[in-house]
Amino acid sequence: MTVPTTPAPARMRTVTATVNGVTRSAETEPRALLSDFLRHDLGLTGTHVGCEQGVCGACTVLVDDVPVRSCLLLAVQADGRRIETVEALAQDGELSGFQRAMRDEHGLQCGFCTPGILMSVTAAEREGLTAEQTTTEVLGGHVCRCTGYQGIRAAIEHHWQEAGR
Amino acid sequence: MKPPAFDYQEPRTLDEIVELLARTDQDATVLAGGQSLVPLLNLRLARPDVVVDINRVPGLDGVEVADDAVVLGAMARLATLERDPVLADALPIVPEAIRLVAHPQIRNRTTLGGSLCHADPAAELPAVAVALDARLHLRARDGGRTEEAAGFFQSVFTTSRRPEELLTAVEFPRHQGFRFCFEEVSRRHGDFPFVGLCFGVRLEDGVVTAARLAGAGIAERPLRLPAAEAALVGHRLSGDLAEVLDAASAEVDPPSDIHGTASFRRGLLRAVIRRAAARLDQGGSR
């Protein structure tokens, strides 16, 4: 059996990105995932890490407005990009419209999957997708083990109705 | 669940990419969309010396439509291709199959070239490439070559692409008069299917005059079904397809694995052929 040799420490890189409207910069290894960069280097622990293989959707953030898995992007790939995380949704302590709908419709219990869902649905709302597209295609990219999805679907429908879409 | 250490290279031109890939002193992996590679890194199933990130190289994601072929850049994201109105008109089977690949959040990053080079035997797009006889354009420092899809896919996660080569574009011939559709059975929408089928026919007065069938999940690579294609000729899609189904069952030797037995997959292949025929009989995709 061969024992993997310990590789030499990789050269550190500086990653600079606009995160939730603020220019943030930190040193990181090239192998660092964007999810870990956000949580460990920038202290933004609202982005949750579940499966680290792109399946669960908990770590979904917006990169240049597009929802992506932050566990499947290297932090260095985010250099120069605009990133939005769940911390950006509430303004001055006021929940966003969809956050309120999630609370009103019991769209979460343990809350682990919630940040990813909030980001995907926020992007769907901005993109002008229908409630039907959002409750099927978009929500299909997220795993929730508490709610059976009923509360989340109700929150999407309620929020879309309220906005007259 | 974290990637091993690697050297990270971020070329800005195609020449720089192939120069990096030509180095023989290191094991280099191309990072395109990263939706298969990064999970493999996280699981440490891949341990490359160098990751060559080609995301900042312009010009590799074009959509070009000519009379006889559609050429798609290898770096075209599936989310972009899915919504491209020109592609939807010229080659609707591609966006149709793309909508079966994973979820929108994944398709926002996944690239056509990455999906083909990863060569998962159950993946939809390799089966489409094989059904349409796509031609894959490969570039190395010392020149380029073109490979037919049938020869490109060799085995599970294995293609004829050499380590020093980059897939730059995929050329899909437009099969005049054909209509295609994609049918599959998967455990959940967005999962890799147990069995998938790209099904194309040319009809004259409702009678099949030519057929192109390629299956996913039925072998270690996407496979054409020549016996089923031959059996289809002369039949009506609404007619008795028993002969076609038997020909397909007889010409495949599907794997038995944790996801399903060989006989289960054979049954599913018959089911997707019936469904695809029924859909194309009702119009289906072009």
Image (cartoon, rainbow, N blue to C red):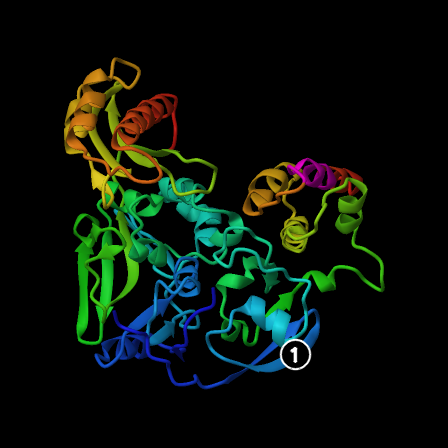
Q: Is residue B286 visible?
A: no
Give coordinates of residue B286: x percent, y percent: 35, 34
Q: How busy is the neighbourhood of tag 1: few (under 14 within 10 Å), some, or many (20 plus)?
A: few
Give coordinates of residue A10: x percent, y percent: 43, 83
Rendering quarter of residue B168? bottom left
Q: Is residue B19 visible?
A: yes
Direction front: furthest residue: A1
Chain letter of mark 1 equals A
B169 and A36: which is toward the camera? A36
A47 and B10: which is toward the camera? A47
Q: Is residue B231 above or below residue B151?
A: above
Rendering quarter of residue A20? bottom right
Q: Which residue is mark 1?
A: A24
Give coordinates of residue A25: x percent, y percent: 62, 81
Span of residues in magenta? A147-156
Q: Residue at x 50, y 73 (%)?
A: A32
